[in-house]
Image (spheres, rainbow, N blue to C red):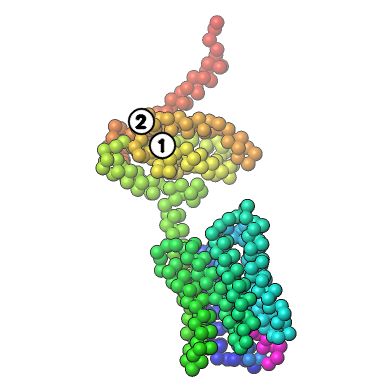
Amino acid sequence: MVDWSKLPDVVAVALLTCAFASVARRNHTPVSRVWLTAWIMIVLHFVFSMFLRAPGMWGILATFGTLATLTWAGVLFMWASIPYRKQHSSLGMMAILLLANSIYIAVTLAGPAMAWALNPAALLFLILPVGLTLLALRRLNHPLRWVAVLLYSCLSVFLLVFQHRPGNGTDLALNAVLFTVFFGCCLHFFYVYRRATAGAFITIAGFLAWALVFVVGSWLIFDYPQIHVESEVWNLPKYIVAVGMILLLLEDQIEHNKHLALHDPLTGLPNRRLFEDRLSSALDRARRIDAQMALLIVDLNRFKQVNDTLGHHVGDLLLQRVGAIFLGRVRRSDTVARTGGDEFSIILEEPASRAEAMHVSQALIELLEKPLQLENQSVRIGASIGIAVFPEDAADMELLCIAADKQMYEEKLRQRTQSHADALSIAHPLPN
C-alpha cells in the first residue's frame, strides 16, 4: 500500500536537492559532493516513507530504509564538516557509525525475537568509537573526535537504560538515535562554521531544530496524544538546513571569487591589485606613527632560461618555490606579492629601516643562489633586488615604486656588467 500523501514531500525535497546539486556543481569542493550524497539519502528517506503502510516484511523493510537513510545522511553531514576527514581514522569512524546505526535499527525493528541483541547493539555505540579513538590517539587528537565519542557514549548509556522500557521503549530508543545524529551535526557545524553569516546561522539552527523534532515529537505523542501536529511541521527543519547549506556554498563561492580577484592563481600570493592596496595602507600607517617602511622589488635573473630549456611546467614550479621561500623569510606582518611574470614585491613594516631591508635583500639573494630541486632538475637562478625606503627615497606610493624599480634595474645592469667582465677576464687572462 502506497501512501500518496507523502508524494508532495518527495517532490519538494527532490527539487530542493536538484537546486542544491546545481549550486554544488559550481562549488567544486569535496564537501559539496558529500553534502549532495547526504541529500540524496534524504530523498530516499521520503521515498521509503511512502511504503510504511505496506503489509508484512515490505513494511518492515520500508521502515528500515526510512530510518537508515536518515541516519546515514546525518553521519555524512557530520563527516563532511570535519577538517581531517581524509584521515584513515576519520573514514573508519564514519564507517563504524554507519554500521552501528544500521545494526541497531535492524535489531530494534526485528521485534521481540531479537530483544537479546539490543544491549550488544547499544554497546556498539560506545565500544567502536572509543576503541577507534584510542587506537588513533597518537596520530589524531581533535576536539570534534571527542565530541563524537562523548555523544555516542551518552547514547549508548541512554539506550541501555530506556530501550527495554515497557510500552514506548523502542520509540524512545529510535528517537534517541536520530536525535544524537542531528544534534551531532549541529555541534560539528557550530565548531567548523564559526562565522557571522546567514548560511552558518540558518544551517546550525536548522540542525538544532531537526534534532529537537525527535525529542518534542516523542514527548507530544506519549504525554499529549490529543495534540496533532501536521507532518509538514516536523519536516520544516530539513528545508531550513537545505536552504542554509545552499547559502553556505554560495558564501564560500563568493569568498573564493574574492580570493581569485586579489591573489595570483599560481602562487597564491597577493596580486598587483592587492599589493597596491596593502602598500597604500602601509604608507598610511607609517605616516601616522612617523616611522619608516621599505619596499623590495625582486626580479629573477635566469627565469626565462629555465622556462625555455626546461618548460613552462618547471617554470611554474619555480615560481611557487620562490614564493614559498620569500614567505618563509619575512615576518607575518610583511607582504609578499607576485606583481609580474617573474617579479615579486615585498613590503616590510613595523618599522623597517634601510639596514634591515638590505639584510633581508641579501638573505633572499643567498637563498636564490642556492640550487633548487624541481622534479629531479637542479635549478640556479639568482635575483636582482631594488630597495626603496619611505620617506627617505619617496613620499608616496608611485614614487616609491619607481625608486625601487630604478634600483632593481641598476642592480641587474651591474650584475650583467660584472658577468661580462668576468667572462672577458677568463677569455683574456692578464699576463704575469
Measured as percent of width and height from the top left, residue 374 is found at: 60, 40
Measured as percent of width and height from the top left, residue 363 is found at: 47, 31
Highlighted magenta segment, given as a residue range: 55-64
Q: Is residue 287 above or below residue 24?
A: above
In this picture, residue 154 sits left or right of residue 279: right
Residue hosting label 1: 297
Q: Quadrant of residue 34?
A: bottom right
Measured as percent of width and height from the top left, residue 112 is found at: 70, 86
In this picture, residue 118 sits left or right of residue 275: right
Q: Is residue 218 above or below residue 55?
A: above
Q: Amino acid at mark 1?
A: Ile
Residue at 54% x, 41% y: name it. Answer: 321
Residue hosting label 2: 354
User: Residue 57 in magenta?
Assistant: yes
Viewport quadrant of the C terminus: top right
Q: Closest to the observer: 151 or 44?
A: 151
Query: What whole-number distance in Å separates the C-alpha atoms at marks 2 and 1?
Result: 14 Å
> What label does residue 353 carry, if any?
none
How crowded is the residue under tag 1: few (<14 C-alpha within 10 Å), some, or many (20+)? many
* SS at circle 2: helix
Q: Closest to the observer: 88 or 124?
A: 124
